[in-house]
Image (cartoon, rainbow, N blue to C red):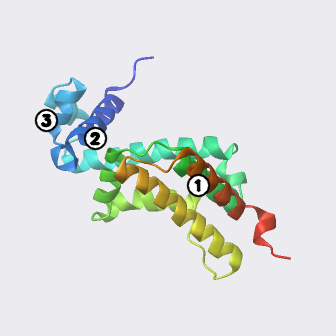
Amino acid sequence: MRPSSRNLILDAAIRVTERAGITGLTLESTAEEAGVTKGGLLYHFHTRDELLMAIQQHLAAAWEERLTAALGKPLAEASVRESTAAYAQVCADDVATKADLAFMVESANHPQLAQVWNDLMNRWAPMPTSAERADIELLLVRMAASGLWLCKATSGSPPSKPMKKALRKRLAQLTEVDHADPA
């Protein structure tokens, strides 16, 4: 099956951003990268804002697929601990790109774009509502996993393999049910 032009355009826009940054992302540069005419691009995305929203949704959908694979079952069947553990695993394993980071940062100034990521986070690693030990540990896992991903996206030099293994192990321990209920 031939991929849709829409997805080809979205992937092209991500490549442009990886190479030239968010300011280098224009309708023209995206059309050129995708090998379509500007009119062909405008058929799918009438404005740069529409393109940005579609990219956010495209990236979030890819995250959702990786999270679901890490979880190994439908999200509706998982506990908050299990979904947070899947989030931590994906953040530790995922290849963070400068384009991913650029689009997430871009969303910080645009409530509609930010909502895409807020919805994803609220499903997979919700902000705890209590200050109980178990909830604090889940928040620490969320923050540490996000920080690890951010470190990879910004520095290009992730932790060493032994350090990464130790971090993954510790994050997994913090999401274990037995650990959350101290004796």
Up/down of 89 relative to 105, above or below: above
Q: Does 11 sit above or below residue 174?
A: above
Asked if residue 156 shows in the view, the reply is yes
Label 3: state its secondary structure: helix
SS class of the residue under badge 1?
helix
Give the residue at x 65% y 71%: 137
Quadrant occupied by the N terminus? top left
| Dot 2: element | helix
Residue 154: where, in percent of width, then height?
A: 35, 53
Q: Earlier in the sequence, mark 1 or mark 3?
A: 3
Residue type highlighted by circle 2: Glu
Q: Which mark is residue 88?
A: 1
Within-10-Å neighbours for mark 1: few <14, some 14–19, many 20+:
many
Q: Quadrant of the C terminus?
A: bottom right
Cα distance in 3D space between marks 1 and 3 = 37 Å
Residue 121 place in picture, x, y as percent:
51, 60
Tell me the crowding category of disc 2: few under 14, some 14 to 19, or many 20 or more residues within 10 angstroms, Cα based.
some
Residue 18 numbered tag: 2
At x 28%, y 40%, the residue is 18
